[in-house]
Amino acid sequence: MTYVIKGVLIDWGGVLTTGLAEAIQDWIAADRIDASNYRTVMIELISQAYDGGSTNIVHALERGELPVAQFEQELAAQLRTLDGGPVVAEGILNRMFAGFRPVAEMSEMLRVAKGAGLRTCLVSNSWGNDYPREDWGEMFDAVVISSEVGMRKPEPGIFEHALGLVGLPAEECVFVDDIEANVTAAQSLGLTAIHHTDPVVTIGALEALVGRPLRRGA
């Protein structure tokens, strides 16, 4: 059976914004963080967060179970500056993600999609960082932030919650994310999924799936 795509579920950081790697590089330079030490710490935390077994402070933060200030303290305690000194914990998450910049063509794609009657929903794992929400009414019919709903990707529940908000079955929705584990999880629930690496490629793939242009003037 062929299903018509009527909804778009989409990630935030690294999809609707510039990449995480670039933001982290900016922060490392500004705060004079020991990059090698940072990579060692984060590789362990992130691999645990997506291995499907053990739990750690990333899970708790993303689900809203761990206060941001406590996570910042625990993360900063594992990091060091280039001269071996301590890293300032307060505000570390907002400093880490301050380099995120909106990707205009992806935001415009969502405006066009929503205006054309497609149901759109943000599905984002939050690290307690601030989101620029001013234009979200033009882009999204629904918003799912992990720390606000007590669930995180790639847990099935967060996808099911988002589908309930847009009022569509999985088979009628496409999910876009830059993390492969989240893409795989969405596919296992019956969603069509796109592993985002490039805005032009992703928008082209979405246009093919929904059968209409998602760029103004196209």
Image (cartoon, rainbow, N blue to C red):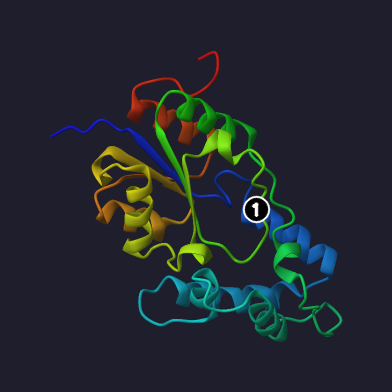
Q: Residue at x 33, y 63 (%)?
A: 157
Q: Residue 22 appears at what percent x and percent y? A: 69, 53
Residue 171 in the image: above or below residue 40: above
Q: Is residue 111 left or right of residue 95?
A: left
138 versus 162 height, above or below: above
- The image shows residue 120, relative to residue 155, as above or below, that is above
Q: Which residue is drawn at 81% across and 78% down?
A: 88
Tell me if residue 184 can be seen.
no
209 or 159: nearer the viewer = 159
Indicate the position of residue 106 as horizontal and vertical percent values: 56, 35
- Which is nearer the eye, 106 or 66? 66
Residue 118 at x, y = what percent? Answer: 39, 30
Which residue is denoted by mark 1 in the rendering? 131
Q: Quadrant of residue 158?
A: bottom left
Which residue corresponds to the image point at 76% horizontal and 78% vertical from the top-left? 89
Q: Residue at x 70, y 83 (%)?
A: 73
Give the quarter of the image for residue 43: bottom right
Instruction: Name the residue at the top extreme.
Output: 217
| Callout 1: SS | loop
Q: Position of residue 140 (x, y in %)?
A: 50, 39
Image height of 29 relative to 41, above or below: above
Give the residue at the far right of this rendering: 83
**Residue 87 showing in the rendered view:** yes
Badge 1 crowding class, 10 Å Cα cut-off, few under 14, some 14 to 19, many 20 or more, is: few
Q: Kindly identify the amino acid type of the residue bearing the numbered disc 1.
A: Tyr
| Residue 2 horizontal side relative to residue 81, left or right | left
Residue 204 occupies which quadrant of the picture? top left
